[in-house]
Amino acid sequence: MSTDLLNDLEEIVNKGLEDSAIPHARGNSIRIKHIVVRKSPKGYLIYDAKENRQIVRTAFKSSAIAIAKNLAQGNDITDKLMGYDNAMLKHYNDAIFYKHSIKKCKDETSKEIKATRLDISIQESYRLRSQLDRFIFC
């Protein structure tokens, strides 16, 4: 009997969340109003449940949540946020490349240059992430 009560309570709470802009997890997806974010092997897919169509695919969860939140609020700034996602992906790939190059390199001067470039990529990733966070939390 207690499990039936818990299931009923969960249905009531989820019904209230479907109409609000508060993100909630349901199964393997995150829902914000009618926008759904799902993880896939190639990134995060964003769907519009009302129109039953895929909107966009992102590389990072933070950019997917930012896009979903703004779409749920009626702001279509997908192109701008995809620019941030692509820039973060570029710096992420650069960081992986520089880490590998530092391991394999034998020349100390070259290692220092690559370490500097790695630091620049990491700092740029943090800057882009903080800009995405403004779209999520504001």
Image (cartoon, rainbow, N blue to C red):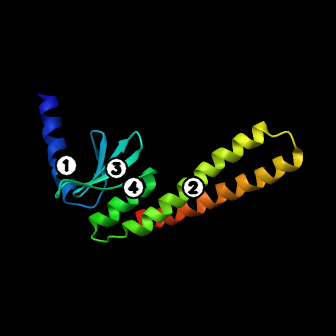
Q: Which residue is mark 4?
A: 64
The number of discs equals 4
Residue at image coords 43%, 57%: 63
State the SS at label 3. strand
Q: Which residue is mark 2?
A: 90
From the image, state whether disc 1 or disc 4 is nearer to you. Answer: 4
Question: In the image, what residue type sits under mark 1?
Answer: Val
Q: Label 4 neighbourhood size at 10 Å, few (<14), some (14-19), many (20+)?
A: many
Above/below status of 46 relative to 67: above
Residue at image coords 14%, 47%: 12
Q: Residue pushed farthest right?
A: 108
From the image, state whether disc 1 or disc 2 is nearer to you. Answer: 2
| Quadrant housing the C terminus | bottom left
Would you say the residues marked 1 and 4 are in contact, meaning their CB atoms lie under 8 Å apart? no
State which quadrant residue 78 falls in. Answer: bottom left
Q: Label 1 neighbourhood size at 10 Å, few (<14), some (14-19), many (20+)?
A: few
Would you say the residues marked 2 and 4 are in contact, meaning their CB atoms lie under 8 Å apart? no
Residue at image coords 83%, 50%: 112
Would you say the residues marked 3 and 4 are in contact, meaning their CB atoms lie under 8 Å apart? yes
Mark before the other along the chain sequence, 1 or 2: 1
| Quadrant housing the N terminus | top left
Q: Which residue is mark 3?
A: 45
Question: In the image, what residue type sits under mark 4?
Answer: Ala
